Image (spheres, rainbow, N blue to C red):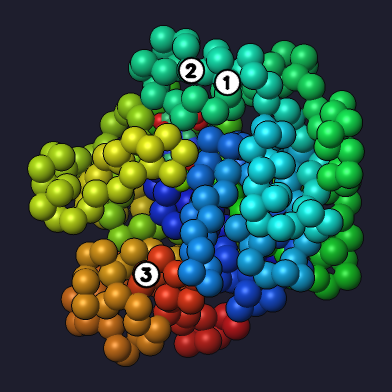
Amino acid sequence: MLYVVVDGFFGDTGKGKMISYLALKDDIDIAVRGGVGPNAGHTVVYEGRTYKLRQIPSAFVNQKTLLLIGAGVLVNPEVFLKEVEETKTRGRIFMDYQTGIIEKKHIEEDRTNAYLKGKIGTTGSGSGPAMRDRVMRILRLAKDYPSLKEYLKDVAYEVNKGLDEGKKVLLEGTQGTFLSLYHGTYPYVTSKDVTAASICADVGVGPKRVDEVILVFKAYVTRVGGGPLENEYSPEEVEKLGLVEIATVTGRRRRVAPFNFNYAKRAVMLNSPTQIAVTKIDVLFKEDYGKKEWKKLSREARKFIEKIEDELSVPVTLIGTGPEVNQIIDRRKDYGLL
Ligand code: IMP
Ligand code: MG
């Protein structure tokens, strides 16, 4: 059984929370991070602790899950090793031999290049310059690093073998559909494609193996850095509406706009989801904080979700009602999907 979880907006929709919930609830055997690299920040709130993960799969909360990082992903060894320590996942976290490695020079360039830093507003994590070096065939790979020796595996083989044995595998996408190098708001995008198909390619699984694509939207839209954002609120409106958010990796304030059906429809087209997850419903409808049953949701919240289903013709199976892993409404049974 193969699930792919991707983001339908500009990143920061709450994939980390959704994935950590699925890891526990569905008892995922193998979780693999695809996407770009440490430019992503996935937040997991579990048992009173908040983890901000840039490299480790969000499924780490399930002690039995094997954690992998695909060959298409970039790793900053310093960030990776720190997170291994913090999450106590040594012994069950591995990356592909051919995972690309970010070096100090890439970070330096990302942070000082006027175009990247000034115009695009990158995260300064070195991801873009490292991808450039990969295309130039000069980037060093994980297998070139003695410090990573114990963390190496043939990830594509592990994943495909696991699927052959009937295991549950989840692929974790990063960033969001409109930050895709190909399908996003170029040039205000990240350095790779990040749609569902690419996440599979990052890991090394073919499209016919995918069973479920879960597309994650937040109840409103945010983006950090430069680039267009339809119907963007002014900073004053953002404060008045209680939608202030601080970016995980960079500490910048996120730009905010209302839920956008044009973006959402295009994201559905680009990712072919079988299910949709909507997070942070409690931020729009405060009285719905922490609710776990569909029928207990406020009328307004239910109407909002039903409108999303009507417009997108895809079931909204997961609804986030708070930051903690278990603050969620799981409607998969109602749809015969569990
Ligand atoms: P880069 O990926 O660091 O090169 O940054 C390129 C653009 O993508 C910038 O606008 C970043 O803010 C944005 N970006 C990259 N990764 C993420 C993410 O994980 N969440 C939100 N925005 C991101
Ligand atoms: Mg994030």
Q: Residue 107 shows which numbered tag?
A: 1
Q: In the image, is the residue at mark 1 within 8 Å of ligand 1 by its beta carbon?
A: no
Quarter of the image that includes the N terminus: bottom right
Q: Earlier in the sequence, mark 3 or mark 1?
A: 1
* Residue 133 to residue 16: above or below: above
Q: Position of residue 165 (x, y in %)?
A: 88, 70
Q: Residue at x 51, y 81 (%)?
A: 332
Q: Secondary structure at mark 3?
A: loop
Q: Position of residue 93 (x, y in %)?
A: 78, 53
Labels 2 and 1 touching (C-beta < 8 A) = yes
Q: Which residue is mark 3?
A: 322
* Residue 126 to residue 302: above or below: above
Left or right of 24? Residue 141 is: right
Labels 3 and 2 touching (C-beta < 8 A) = no
Looking at the image, which is closer to me, 194 or 290? 290
Q: In the image, is the residue at mark 3 within 8 Å of ligand 2 by its beta carbon?
A: no
Left or right of 59? Residue 216 is: left
Q: Tell me the distance, in whole angstroms, between the alpha carbons under discs 2 and 1.
A: 6 Å
Left or right of 77? Residue 327 is: left
Q: Tell me the distance, in whole angstroms, between the alpha carbons under discs 3 and 1.
A: 34 Å
Q: Earlier in the sequence, mark 3 or mark 2?
A: 2
Q: Residue 111 shows which numbered tag?
A: 2
Amino acid on which disc 2 is placed: Arg
Quarter of the image that includes the C terminus: bottom right
Q: Secondary structure at mark 1?
A: helix
Q: In the image, is the residue at mark 2 within 8 Å of ligand 1 by its beta carbon?
A: no
Can the viewer see residue 153 in this picture?
A: yes
Q: Tell me the distance, in whole angstroms, between the alpha carbons under discs 3 and 2.
A: 34 Å
Dot 2 crowding, Cα within 10 Å, few <14, some 14–19, many 20+:
some
Q: Residue 164 shows which numbered tag?
A: none
Q: Position of residue 210 (x, y in %)?
A: 69, 61
